Image: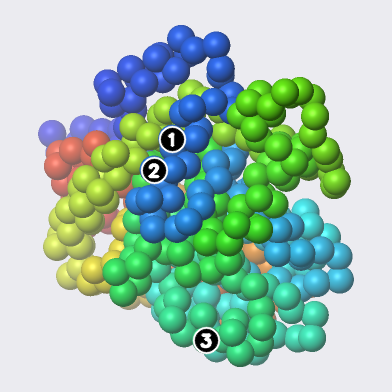
Amino acid sequence: MKNETMDVPLFNPEISKADKKVILDSLQSSILSGGPNLKKFEALFAKHMGTKFAIGVSSATAALHLSLLSQGIGKGDEVIIPDFTFVATANAVALTGAKAICADIDSTLNISIKDIERKITKKTKAVIVVHFSGVPCKMNEIKKIVKKYNLKLIEDCAHAIGAKVDKKFVGTFGDTGCFSFFATKNMTTIEGGMITTNSRVTANKVSSLRAHGITKSVSQRYGSKHPWDYDVDEPGYNFKLDEMRSSLGISQLSRLDKIIKKRQRIAKYYNQKLKNVKGIEISNLNNKNHVYHLYIIKITDDFEMSRNTVHKQLKNEGIQTTVHYRPIHEFSLFKENKPEEFPNTNKAFAECLSIPFFVTITKKQQDYVIRKIKEL
Ligand SMILES: Cc1ncc(COP(=O)(O)O)c(C=O)c1O
């Protein structure tokens, strides 16, 4: 066994038998988009999260984009985002015509609250926080800052569905919460997203913008005398979530709590086995609110091998790892954000490595990953 290699992927989505059944059932209907499954998924999601509204969209990127538009963000405005996030957070800002102003992170890999305050100018209209890797941001402190400066608050919950702060789910603190159901996420519709909000005005606005700017929903139109009687008062997008994805979302949401508990158990095993390895630091070790979209280790100077070499050596052993993510300031599109402003992000980017993590990972696979890291 010693010299044998084993292929261990970074992610491996779980589509259960029940998931497959609801997908096939949804295809039996004559309504494949804008039908009862979407309505049901939205209602169940809002109930689960404890928000008044939930609006299904085609991705978290669409959710962020429409959230910003619904808050009136556009050209001439600045939106503060963390430098350490997936580019979708920054792109959503750029797509509205506003400028993405990056803030550094703190030791949790989440946006630094001090740096948010430092980056506020007269042009700042909103803050987007990202609950990075599944660790909730300090929402009570962030709420105080946005209130003090009268800013809009959008939560990027792409990594953190089910995470809580003081028993309240992330995605319920801001003007909107934006969720991703991409294939690797804690629950999936393959591609898909959701916007949560307690504001009826915001809910109506994003509902219209996701469907071409049309002011009436499909059911409102077909329930009326003339389905073609509707208005368009601004250009919208086609960011709809179809019936098949919605049915998958309903099925996955019904076992979300179990999925999270399982992810926390898997993380606990890695924690136990890796926490005493010299030179390896486990990101957010002992954070009980972590819902583990990613399991991140930091390869510090004491490991005496660079992070890039660790990645390469593990790849040679069949183990897939990666870095989440290249900081926003490194992209040409966002180069107005200068590298020297982000010492913590730069350090995290040099040290972090995401290792294989998914609900169906076996003990054998975990033991193999652990052994290969220890043997380096
Ligand atoms: C932090 C963050 N925000 C937004 C997104 C965009 O999600 P989607 O792929 O659903 O558009 C991602 C995707 O990985 C992400 O990691």
Q: Given the image, on which type of amino acid does mark 1 rest?
A: Lys
Specify which label sits upstream in the sequence, 3 or 2: 2
Residue at 39%, 43% in the rendered image: 44
- Which residue is more in the foreground, 269 or 22? 22
Label 1 near label 2: C-beta < 8 Å?
yes
Residue at 41%, 29% in the rendered image: 248
Specify which label sits upstream in the sequence, 3 or 1: 1
Camera-nearest label, 3 or 1: 1
On the rendered image, what quadrant is the N terminus found in?
A: top left
Element assignment for label 3: helix
> What colour scheme was applied to this rendering of the protein?
rainbow
Is residue 268 something that shows in the picture? Answer: yes
Label 1 near label 3: C-beta < 8 Å?
no
Q: Given the image, on which type of amino acid does mark 3 rest?
A: Lys
Side of 296 relative to 209 (left or right): left
- The percent coordinates of residue 36 (x first, y second) are 49, 27
Residue at 20%, 62% in the rendered image: 271
Disc 2 target residue: 44
Question: What whole-number distance in Å separates the C-alpha atoms at marks 3 and 2?
Answer: 30 Å
- Mark 2 crowdedness (10 Å alpha carbons): few <14, some 14-19, many ≥20: some
Disc 3 target residue: 144
- Which residue is more in the foreground, 338 or 56? 56
- Mark 3 crowdedness (10 Å alpha carbons): few <14, some 14-19, many ≥20: few
Camera-nearest label, 3 or 2: 2
Element assignment for label 2: helix
Side of 274 relative to 174 (left or right): left
Q: Given the image, on which type of amino acid does mark 2 rest?
A: Leu
Give the label on residue 40, or none.
Answer: 1
- Mark 1 crowdedness (10 Å alpha carbons): few <14, some 14-19, many ≥20: some
- The percent coordinates of residue 57 (x first, y second) are 59, 41
Is residue 306 something that shows in the picture? Answer: no
Element assignment for label 1: helix
